[in-house]
Structure formats: C-alpha cells, structure tokens
C-alpha cells in the first residue's frame, strides 16, 4: 500500500525511456550516459510525462562550444515521478540538425574579429 506522502507526490517511475536525436555525436552520447548526468536527471526532474522535452546542456570539453540537446520522454513505466532508483534508458530518434562539438577551435568555427 502506498504511503499518503507517496500518493500526494506520485510514485517513482521504475523506468523512463528518453530519446536523443540521431545526429548527436558519439561524444554527446557518451555524455548522456555518464553517471553524473544520469544522477542529474534523477535529481532535477520531478514529474515526468510521455512527450516532455528537456533542453539539456552537455559538456563538450575544454574550450568547445556549448551543446544543448533536446531529450524527449518516450515512455514512463511505473510511477509518474523521477526517483533515485529510476532506470533511465535511451532510444535514438530522427535527426534534428543539432550542431556541437569542437567548432569553436576549428577552421569551421566563427571567424569574427
């Protein structure tokens, strides 16, 4: 039986399936799978619903440009809240033209003076 507090706040989901765009780089895919990023999602996302989109900043390393990635909730299993034990799994969805990485340091980067 659920406690009164759990009912008013919602139950923790057992699994949340999140998608990222197909054109997310291998470095970006590595970043979304790090322990600290998964812990960040578990701590900062409260109620989760299918279709939610989170614009999340990913670290691109020293002196790189910023990379904001749209993560979309595809499925929620169990309760409706992110919890410390919620398993987060990823799926790949269609590309969205995301650009990120080391462009600031490369010849392809901005040429402003």
Image (cartoon, helix red, strand yellow):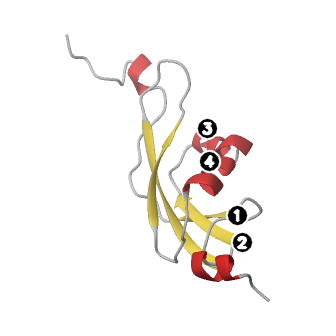
Is label 2 or label 4 in front? 4
Q: Where is residue 61 in the image (x, y as percent from the top left)?
A: 56, 25
Per the image, label 4 sits on a secondary structure element best described as helix
CB-based contact (under 8 Å), mark 2 and mark 1: yes
Q: Where is residue 97 in the image (x, y as percent from the top left)?
A: 38, 52
Above or below for 59 versus 70: above
For marks 3 and 2, the one nearer the N-term is: 2
Residue 77 in view (yes/no)? no
CB-based contact (under 8 Å), mark 4 and mark 3: no
Residue sitting nearer the eye, 62 or 103: 62
Residues at marks 2 and 1, CA–CA distance in whole angstroms: 7 Å
Horizontally, residue 7 falls left or right of residue 25, namely right
For marks 1 and 4, the one nearer the N-term is: 4
The residue under label 1 is 89
Per the image, label 2 sits on a secondary structure element best described as strand
For marks 2 and 4, the one nearer the N-term is: 2
Is label 4 or label 3 in front? 4
Residues at marks 3 and 2, CA–CA distance in whole angstroms: 24 Å
The residue under label 2 is 15
Tell me the tag on residue 27: 3
Local packing at callout 2 (Cα closer than 10 Å; few below 14, some 14-19, many 20+) is some
Q: Where is residue 52 in the image (x, y as percent from the top left)?
A: 46, 70
Tell me the tag on residue 40: 4
Q: Residue furthest top?
A: 113
Is label 3 or label 2 in front? 2
Q: Position of residue 63 (x, y in %)?
A: 47, 18
Residues at marks 1 and 4, CA–CA distance in whole angstroms: 14 Å
For marks 2 and 1, the one nearer the N-term is: 2
Q: Which residue is drawn at 73% across and 59% down?
A: 84
Is label 2 or label 1 in front? 2
Local packing at callout 4 (Cα closer than 10 Å; few below 14, some 14-19, many 20+) is few
């Amino acid at each position: 039986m659920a406690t009164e507090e759990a009912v008013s706040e919602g139950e923790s989901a057992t699994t949340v399936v999140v998608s990222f765009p197909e054109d997310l780089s291998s470095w970006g895919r590595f970043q979304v799978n790090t322990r600290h990023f998964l812990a960040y999602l578990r701590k900062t996302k409260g109620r989760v619903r299918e279709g939610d989109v989170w614009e999340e900043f990913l670290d691109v390393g020293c002196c790189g440009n910023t990379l904001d990635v749209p993560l979309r909730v595809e499925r929620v299993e169990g309760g409706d809240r992110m919890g410390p034990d919620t398993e987060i799994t990823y799926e790949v969805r269609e590309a969205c033209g995301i650009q990120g990485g080391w462009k600031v340091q490369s010849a392809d980067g901005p040429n402003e003076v």
